[in-house]
Image (spheres, rainbow, N blue to C red):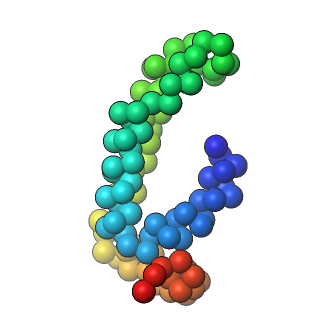
Amino acid sequence: MRDFATLAGPFINGYAFCDVANQQAIRAKALDWVEKNPYEAMFMERLPAKSSNRRQALVKAHALKRDNAAKERAYLQDPANVAKLRADRAANGADDKYCWK
């Protein structure tokens, strides 16, 4: 998963942060959906797992994702941070590359 995020993350975020408010709304909806629709293969005993308590590990993973989203939301509620994000995107051409006009 880490390798996928490293490879695809910059492209996904390039599109996602064209509209910060929309990105935040979509992230919240995605977190809710993932929590309500767990990947059932995680609970198959015949597949190896890092944790002996898969449900507890899932709860901890969801909590970590929600905590990270809350930190991002708090960061993006500061207008100075959003202004810097927009300036950085303009400087590196991200808006021209990823955002539809």
- Is residue 20 at all visible to an observer of this figure? yes
Q: Position of residue 83 (x, y in %)?
A: 38, 80
Instruction: Check the image and report above or below for 71 versus 14.
Output: above
Q: Would you identify the image quadrant in which residue 41 lies?
A: top right
Q: Position of residue 87 (x, y in %)?
A: 46, 84
The quarter in which the C terminus is drawn is bottom left
Instruction: Check the image and report above or below for 83 versus 63.
Output: below
Q: Position of residue 72 (x, y in %)?
A: 40, 57
Instruction: Check the image and report above or below for 97 versus 40.
Output: below
The quarter in which the N terminus is drawn is top right
Identify which residue is drawn at 33% across, 50% down: 28
Q: Would you identify the image quadrant in which residue 78 lies?
A: bottom left
Identify which residue is drawn at 48% across, 79% down: 99
Instruction: Check the image and report above or below for 101 versus 68.
Output: below
Identify which residue is drawn at 66% across, 55% down: 6
Q: Position of residue 68 (x, y in %)?
A: 43, 48
